[in-house]
């Protein structure tokens, strides 16, 4: 069973692998508030994209949790990197769900503004920041659905969640199939 669903004219699909090798218009990064890079997907994006990404991040200087900013994608096979800062998981009662949802909504809105029809998004907050995978998948995919519901005219043609490993892929697939009816 292929991990793909549609909402109106937008495809929501899944890919297992390294997001820095994924060919699309905009790559979303799971950054931190300093925008100065780090480990995980953030480190991989800065390493693969080159120093022009960090230079632009430095100029911007800061991004609050739940918000998103865009930079060049350097030498990555995309036009832009959208850096968003996910919440650190603190047990679920510190507004984590609203903040993660905001990351997705802000990233998608920037993608529309910048006219990036195909966005690739990692499992934000599920690594170093400790967000439980099943909860992150539900919040992230629900946010995509709500965004598409509220932007029927939007230019988004495809939203791909890029999952690094098998368990993450499986969790996002189960959630995708439960939230989006079969095509
Ligand atoms: N491609 C796709 N997904 C990846 C890749 C990759 N190359 N590398 C890791 N993942 P994390 P966070 C997955 O820790 O939890 C950084 O230091 C990984 O398996 O990258 O939001 C930042 O600077 C996990 O499922 O991001 C922040 O300080 C997911 O990406 C902090 O980590 C997110 O894991 C942000 O933590």
Image (spheres, grey):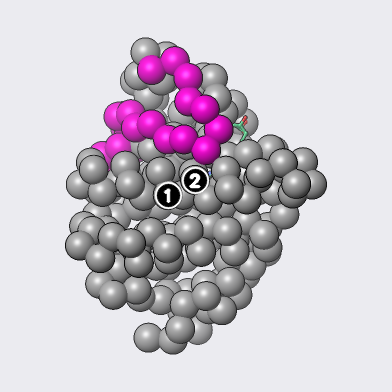
Q: Is residue 103 magenta?
A: no
Question: Can you say whether 156 is above or below 106 in the image?
Answer: below
Q: Read off the magenta span.
A: 60-80
Classify mark 1: helix, strand or loop: helix
Front position in the image: 89 or 118: 89
Q: What residue lies at 30% left-to-right and 51% top-to-bottom?
A: 24
Tally of numbered discs: 2
Q: Which mark is residue 105?
A: 1
Residue 141 spot, x, y in % from top left:
51, 63
Label 1 Cα crowd, 10 Å radius (few <14 / some 14-19 / many 20+): many
Front position in the image: 142 or 130: 142
Q: What residue lies at 62% left-to-right and 70% top-to-bottom?
A: 170
Q: What residue lies at 54% left-to-right and 20% top-to-bottom?
A: 34
Write down the quadrant of residue 157 in the picture.
bottom left
Write down the quadrant of residue 158 in the picture.
bottom left
Front position in the image: 119 or 153: 153
Q: CA distance from mark 1 to mark 2?
A: 5 Å
Residue 9 lies left or right of residue 51; in this view the side is: left
Q: Which residue is under mark 2?
A: 102
For this orientation, the residue located farthest to the right is 91
Residue 144 spot, x, y in % from top left:
43, 60
Q: Is residue 64 magenta?
A: yes
Does any portion of residue 105 appear in the rendered image?
Answer: yes
Label 2 Cα crowd, 10 Å radius (few <14 / some 14-19 / many 20+): many
Q: Main secondary structure of the magenta part?
A: loop
Residue 94 lies left or right of residue 70; in this view the side is: right
Question: Can you say whether 136 is above or below 80 in the image?
Answer: below
Classify mark 2: helix, strand or loop: helix
Q: Are marks 1 and 2 in contact (CB under 8 Å)?
A: yes
Does any portion of residue 44 appear in the rendered image?
Answer: no
Residue 163 spot, x, y in % from top left:
55, 57
Cβ at disc 1 under 8 Å from ligand 1: no
């Amino acid at each position: 069973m292929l991990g793909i669903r549609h909402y109106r004219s937008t495809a929501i699909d899944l890919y297992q692998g390294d997001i820095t090798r994924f060919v699309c218009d905009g790559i979303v990064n799971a950054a931190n508030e300093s925008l100065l890079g780090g480990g995980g997907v953030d480190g991989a994006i800065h390493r693969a994209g080159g120093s022009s990404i960090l230079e632009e991040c430095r100029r911007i200087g800061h991004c609050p949790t739940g918000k998103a900013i865009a930079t060049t994608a350097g030498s990555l096979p995309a036009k832009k990197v959208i850096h968003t800062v996910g919440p650190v998981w603190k047990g679920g009662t510190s507004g984590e769900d609203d903040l993660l949802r905001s990351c997705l909504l802000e990233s998608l809105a920037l993608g529309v503004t910048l006219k990036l029809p195909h966005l690739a998004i990692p499992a934000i907050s599920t690594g170093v920041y400790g967000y439980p995978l099943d909860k992150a998948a539900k919040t992230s995919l629900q946010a995509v659905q709500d965004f598409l519901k509220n932007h029927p005219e939007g230019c988004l043609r495809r939203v791909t969640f890029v999952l690094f490993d098998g368990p993450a892929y499986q969790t996002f697939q189960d959630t995708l199939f439960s939230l989006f009816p079969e095509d």
